[in-house]
Amino acid sequence: MIDIGARIKELREERRITGKELAERIGVSPSQMTRIEKGQRRVDSEVIARLAEVLDLSPAAFFAADAPEADALSPKRQKELGLGDLHAEIGKLIRSERRRRHLTIDDLARRTGHTKAYVLAVEEGRRSGLEGDFIRKASRLLQLDPFLLLERQESIIRGLSVRVHRLTSDAIQADPAGGGIPILLGDEADYPCEFDRDGEPIATVEGTLRIPELAGTRSFALRVRGEGMTAPPFRAGDLVVFGGPEPIRNGAFAFIRHGSDRSTFGRLFRDQPEKLRIQYLRPEVAPLMLRADELTRAWPLIAHVVIGDPRGGAS
């Protein structure tokens, strides 16, 4: 049987955090923290959730001392991959069904064996709902169609099927002629707005990027710029790689050329056969609406590159 208190202490010490510091960050007193680590105080799901967030772990890490930590996604990693969208969609579905059946949050919490705060966090998309088998219990209680859950998941996952690479600055070569994927810089706009006879973007080449899996492909990289897409999972300055033979799927991230000299980076949706919508990640940035004949070309996003140490602020 796992000693939860001892496991918490072990994970805390691995990160060189004192018991007093951890207590302050999760909102308990130092004496309560001591009792938790000694197994003298019960650790509920909300305390585990706060510990997981502060220590950048999956809640499962506290219950599996022998399991490699990398097997579970930490909250920070989930945010990088955009899984918050998935959690939010599942949360909305659960809230809608709960209200339709005239159940309160207290009712759902009591009947699934979780706290009211935890259920609220799931409905708001701040927790995955996978801890303590909540999703399975809630689905059974609310009689949710499993295919409806899968449909929601599929709609989000389609937009997440992008390879995420963590590379050091050594992956970038300053010599543009050194081979690899060219990193293009927009001279006057956020993204290149000039194109050659073949329709490929023309811009100043900052350097080249080495990603072995993409060697030999006709691809190019851009820096994430502007307000629209500087939101999780992307940050300003991240590298996004476009290209490949795959067709653009509805809702996919893409570099989009519209008209003769305009371009943008966003998610491309075909709402109607003759109408397109380019959606940005920041809700305050209005989507760009286009006629189908205004779309000149679109390149699918095939890799998101984060340069540097994720613990140093590169995630």
Image: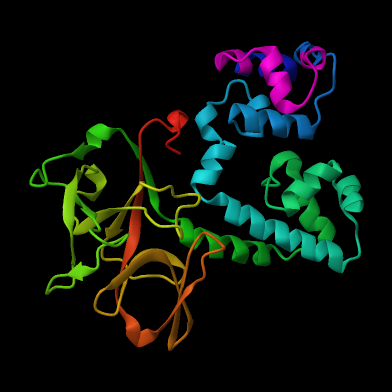
What is the number of callouts on the image? Answer: 0
Judge from the rendering whether residue 278 lies leftward or rightward of residue 299; answer left or right. Answer: right
Q: How is the image coloured?
A: rainbow
The x, y position of residue 94, in whole percent, is 76, 59
Q: Residue 64: horizontal and vertical position, in percent?
A: 64, 25
**Vertical arrangement, residue 280 with respect to residue 241, above or below:** below
266 above or below 62? below
Q: Is residue 224 left or right of residue 10?
A: left
The residue lying at 61 percent from left, 26 percent from top is 55
The segment highlighted magenta reads 12-33
Quarter of the view holding residue 41? top right
User: Is residue 197 or residue 62 the one in the foreground?
Assistant: 197
Res 1 visible: no
| For residue 107, side relative to residue 81 (left or right) | right
Viewer-nearest residue: 111 or 252: 252
Image: 86 above or below 293? above
| Residue 16 is a magenta residue | yes
Task: Please name the predominant secondary structure of the magenta segment in the image.
Answer: helix
Q: Quadrant of residue 305?
A: top left
> Does the image show residue 277?
yes
Q: Position of residue 177 (x, y in %)?
A: 7, 46
Per the image, is 145 magenta?
no
In the rendered image, the quadrant that contains the N terminus is top right
Q: Is residue 70 above or below residue 6?
A: below
The image quadrant where one finds the C terminus is top left
**Residue at 29% across / 61% down in the picture?**
191
Image x and y of residue 265, in percent: 37, 63
Residue sitting nearer the eye, 125 or 141: 125
